[in-house]
Image: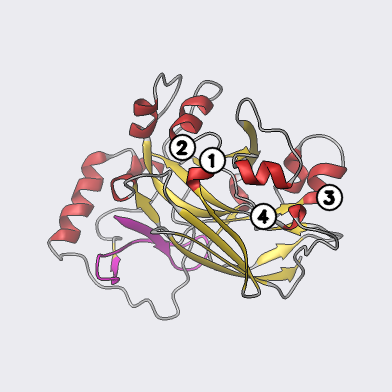
Amino acid sequence: MKLLRVGTAGAERPALLDAEGTLRDLSGTVTDIDGALLADTAALDRIRSAAEAGELPVLDAAGLRVGPPVGRIGKVVCIGLNYHDHAQETGAATPAEPVIFFKAADTVVGPHDTVLVPRKSEKTDWEVELAIVIGSTARYLESHEQALAHVAGYAVSHDVSEREFQIERGGTWDKGKNCETFNPLGPWLVTADEVADPQALSLKLWVNGELKQDGTTAQQIFPVAEVVRYVSQFMTLYPGDVINTGTPAGVAMGQPEPKPYLRAGDVVELEIAGLGRQRQELKQA
């Protein structure tokens, strides 16, 4: 299933995109697309049955904002330097273990919402990423099979970053990762049963129409199953939590001088095969 949330920010309603590309209203079936729903297999089965029976009312998509596909996210866990080619382009050693950092849940916005360039920013950068959405509580998982069983689905994530804040201002990466609007997510949460192999997904990103990133999750150093298993050794993952799994080569930081960092007025578009497409216009904060 392709689950999404539509409407004004803070007042989104649950919806489903059916196999024919028609937007269907879920508000008469469930209250939201959130951790509580993703942990409720009976509720998910009701949605699936209603969709297959054609019982869900049509929603007019014209002029309707698409919000983040998951509401009330608890935490956004991020994996850094998780593609071989990205580590190489930044001059970083291949990590022996996954690099973990966090984004605050309030950085998450809709897939077509405005992204704000922070004040005094000179190095705002792009990163297309595969996001994992957790479907059941995960702690101390022992195998990759267990890990994948705890995944509700996948989504497109844009891990916007400010490199000076991240790398040159001391401390951890958090200052360059948590600026407002720095995590567009969606358009859909695609349930795990529709993604046959999360290690066979193409990722692409364009800036002002120019292709900048063109990669595949096959290049991940730590695959999806290992990421979930590994993270569960250090923290409890709850339904609705999101894990951003890293970005392939092609970010501005990895390009020759003068590096083409983002500015107000730029347009970024990104997509992952089968998971949908995002588009954001950048404006000054």
| Mark 1 in CB contact with mark 2 (< 8 angstroms) | yes
Q: Give the amino acid at mark 2.
A: Val
Q: Which residues are magenta?
A: 1-24
Q: Nearer the viewer, mark 1 or mark 3?
A: 1
Classify residue 175 by image quadrant: top right
Tag 2 near tag 3, CB within 8 Å: no
Image quadrant for the N terminus? bottom left
How far is mark 4 from mark 1, CA to CA? 19 Å
Q: Which residue is mark 1?
A: 220
| Residue 160: numbered disc | 4
The earlier-in-sequence mark between 1 and 3 is 3
Q: Give the secondary structure at mark 4.
A: loop
Instruction: Residue at 71%, 52% (x, y): give it.
Output: 161
Tell me, yes or no, whether the highlighted magenta stretch contains residue 22.
yes
User: Callout 1: helix, strand or loop?
Assistant: loop
- Name the element at disc 3: helix
Q: Amino acid at mark 3?
A: Glu
Whether pointer 4 and pointer 2 mark residues with C-beta atoms closer than 8 Å, the reply is no
The amino acid on which the numbered mark 1 sits, given as a three-letter code, is Gln
Q: Are marks 1 and 3 in contact (CB under 8 Å)?
A: no
Tag 2 residue: 224
Residue 250, relative to residue 8: is it above or below? above
Q: Within 10 Å of the Cα at label 2, are there few (<14), some (14-19), or many (20+) other Cα atoms?
A: many
Q: Residues within 10 Å of mark 4 (few under 14, many from 20)?
A: many
Q: Is residue 38 above or below residue 25?
A: above
